Image: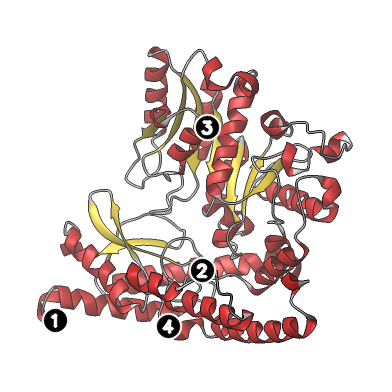
Amino acid sequence: MKFDLNLAQRNDVWTSLVKQLESYYSETDKHKASVYPSREEVVRFLNADFENPIPVEVAIEQVIKGLTDYAVHTPHPQYFGMFNPRANFPSILADVISAVYNPQLAAWGHAPYAVEIEHLLIQEIGKKFGYRSPDIDGVFATGGQEAHITGLLCALHEKYPDFASSGVRGLKKQPIVYCSSASHHATIKAARVCGLGGEAVKYIPVDEKQRMLVSELERQIKEDEAAGLQPFFVFATMGTTGSGAIDPIKEINEMAEKYDLWVHADAAYGGAVRLTDSYSKLLDGIEGADSITFDAHKWLSVPMAASLFITKHRYVLGKAFSISANFMPEEEDEIDRLGSYTHSIQWSRRFIGLKLYLPLLVFGWKGYEETIMHQIRMGDYLRQALQKHGWNIYNHTQLPIVCFTDERLEDDSDFSKFIYEKTLEKGNTWIINYPYEEFATLRACITNYNTQENHIDNLVNWLNENRKEYLKTPAEAGV
């Protein structure tokens, strides 16, 4: 068939492609960490002409060059940006294998091996969070946003038995969702997607460590009840995107029990510490949450997009998503509920779980623990190196996220903007500017298991040089 190419062509393409990909993978640090071209330049490079096909080798070379020349290189050891890691090699192989076999996970009978792998992973990771079998359930999702939406929909179907048929129009009171003012904006998007509207989300103030103030949560709940609203759901963040803050989950659980709220723990990033002995306690109390978001494509170093929604309510996913279709196979009840079409937002779905299953087979939990601990140590090293050179640390977390600036410039947003723009201009590293409370700070996060002390030293030296440039003279810099 034309789409298959022929065997000789495929062998040549595989050989050439592997060589090019291996060159990038093994020598990522030889590239700039980031580039920021004009849109006109990128569009001009595309130069796509679908009326005149080109040889596959030429097409691949064009794509490789485009991704190399026009992208922030998140696998780079001097990428200190958001939670975008370097993918471990077995997880990359898993993506290739999944693409070739292309299993359909809508129903157990179509891909029993793949479905059972994902079910096993949900069970095992649920146990890491403190949930107990046989009550653990969950599903793989494309990202944290889908997992959040899944949690909110499960809560709506659990709280309002008629929600599946009548939806929001059948509700007598407006349901209210709570989250901290430092939480991810995925909360408000989830409320919009579920039909509750952005006004259903109430932001709760945080303390000096950017943790939700539970006393303020209770005050807001009482105020909303008095106003005729229906408090029903609270997001507890286990490692905020900006500063790594961990909400007091035990106290939130107590408040939720008192007022009959569903607790969803956003452990998309910070949840990985549950795979360590030394830092697992940071998330003590998460076992009391009704459901959890956990992104494997963040700290577990697998390719986008691999998120998990996990719950301790075994049948709630069925309440939210179960549906019958005469073109789908009839299966036993226990098997039937494992397929994604009765179990998730999605119907047809890619084999997401293989990206986590294969590296776990190769490295095990111990390998992941060692990797996570290395990144935490690199975060500590970054704090020490910054402080040694006169930078002030503003956030309070044991996770490898550092919000910092020169104390003399903490009110100067132009300084943090200057540093950020220099990253775009020079491309030797990648950090962002981040407003921590009233302070104009910079933010760096260890996201790469290959980041070592020398990469951090390079970052700090670069920051020092640019600070001096901003302050005009070395003497004024005082360092």
C-alpha separation, residue under disc 3 versus residue under disc 1: 55 Å
**Foreground tag (3 vs 1):** 3
Q: Please report the residue visible at 16 percent of the width from the left and 73 percent of the height from the top.
A: 470
C-alpha separation, residue under disc 4 versus residue under disc 1: 24 Å
- Residue 121 appears at what percent x and percent y? 73, 53
In the image, taking residue 113 as reference, residue 161 lies left or right, namely left
SS category of the residue bearing label 4 = helix
Query: Which residue in the protein does label 2 denote?
Result: 375
SS category of the residue bearing label 2 = helix
| Residue 265: quarter of image | top right
Pointer 3 with pointer 1, Cβ within 8 A? no
- Residue 228 appears at what percent x and percent y? 42, 12
Q: Please report the residue visible at 46 percent of the width from the left and 19 percent of the height from the top.
A: 174
Query: Which residue in the protein does label 4 denote?
Result: 454
Quadrant of image for the N terminus: bottom right
**Foreground tag (3 vs 4):** 3
Query: Which residue in the protein does label 1 denote?
Result: 474
Answer yes or no: is residue 479 visible: no
Pointer 2 with pointer 3, Cβ within 8 A? no
SS category of the residue bearing label 1 = helix
**Mark 4: which amino acid?**
Asn
Name, please, the residue furthest toward the front: 51
- Residue 147 appears at what percent x and percent y? 58, 44
Quadrant of image for the C terminus: bottom left
C-alpha separation, residue under disc 2 versus residue under disc 3: 36 Å
